[in-house]
Image (cartoon, rainbow, N blue to C red):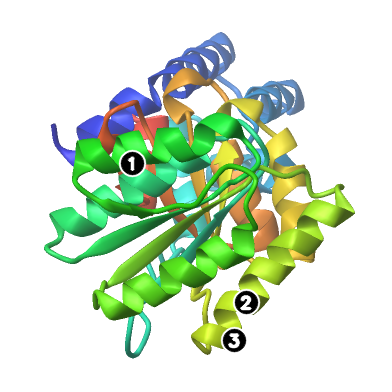
Amino acid sequence: MSLFAKFKAGLAKTHSKLVHEIKRIVTGSPRLTGATLEELEHALIAADFGMAMTTQISGAVKKAYESQGGTGLDVFAIARAEVEKSLSANKPDLLKAASGPTIVSIVGVNGTGKTTTSAKLAFLIQSQNKTALLAACDTFRAAAIEQLKLWGTRLKVEVIASAYGSDAASVAHDAVTAAQARKADYLFIDTAGRLHTKHNLMQELHKLHRVIGKQLPGAPHEVLLVLDGSTGMNALNQAREFNKAVPLTGLIVTKLDGTSKGGMVVAIQKELGLPVKFIGLGEQPDDLQPFDARQFAQALFEE
């Protein structure tokens, strides 16, 4: 399956709802009135594009109508171009440390799919003929270590782990040592799910980052926040708060295949200016894909 086909299949729910609504609005009124524009805005907000992006798209539609009239006005093409333009500054590539292993800390609230995402990232790196290690630093959730080990076995990726309840920072320390000794290209650290409002858990994350930074200056090189696409604009609040607590370098949006709120990817990127590095479009290891602005915009607005 091509990358675009994956994007299209993964965003099918958002796409079909959007296209249906926009077609209904456009065919219902040959003239672009204030009421038509308001309906268009409602449709975009319902797909969680956020206020800023919605205003940008409706402004571009209004401008095109004023200059060329209703004949040949392609709302889909305009929306697609505006979304692509907004996302085009996005740099989806994973950073690479100048020397030694690149350390990537995977953070987020409970239930967003951090453990699965960590494993899929390791799989992606190995498919590029690079080496990856995984660190089981979610020592709170009893099943998290076993889950990561199962993924490790399935994908043939080594997992550095300790006992349930052990100090996450010391597991991270051991994992960095192992990554250096094995000359691994990447180490993905699966951290415990935590609410940004829980001060003690945020302190623990700071400690983990401090420990690996002492051991390997510059680490972690990436701090990626995993967001559940089906939570819509609630994900924006999480991203906002996490970014205040730990400096994020990028976002990974999962579970987009199960939601009609795919616009939230655009809303978050527009507000926070954080690059969307990967999106999750299904259950399989290769369903985590590097983000592509053009194909994303096309999959959302292709008639």
| Pair 1/2: label in front | 2
* Residue 227 % position (x, y): 58, 41
* Residue 282 % position (x, y): 35, 27
* Residue 195 % position (x, y): 77, 43
Q: Is residue 104 left or right of residue 196?
A: left
Rounded to the nearest whole Å, what is the CA distance between mark 1 and mark 2? 29 Å
Q: Mark 3 near mark 2, Cβ–Cβ under 8 Å?
A: yes
Q: Which labelled disc corresponds to residue 205?
A: none
Q: Pointer 1: what residue?
A: 288
Give neighbour class at mark 3: few <14, some 14-19, many 20+ (Cα, 10 Å): few
Circle 1 — which element?
Answer: strand
Rounded to the nearest whole Å, what is the CA distance between mark 3 and mark 1? 31 Å
Q: Which labelled disc corresponds to residue 214?
A: 3
Q: Earlier in the sequence, mark 3 or mark 1?
A: 3
Quarter of the rendering containing residue 184: bottom left
Q: Pointer 2: what residue?
A: 211
User: What residue is at 24 percent from the left and 74 percent from the top?
Assistant: 182
Quarter of the rendering containing residue 88: bottom left
Q: Amino acid at mark 3?
A: Lys
Rounded to the nearest whole Å, what is the CA distance between mark 3 and mark 2? 5 Å
Circle 3 — which element?
Answer: helix
Q: Amino acid at mark 2?
A: Val
Give neighbour class at mark 2: few <14, some 14-19, many 20+ (Cα, 10 Å): some
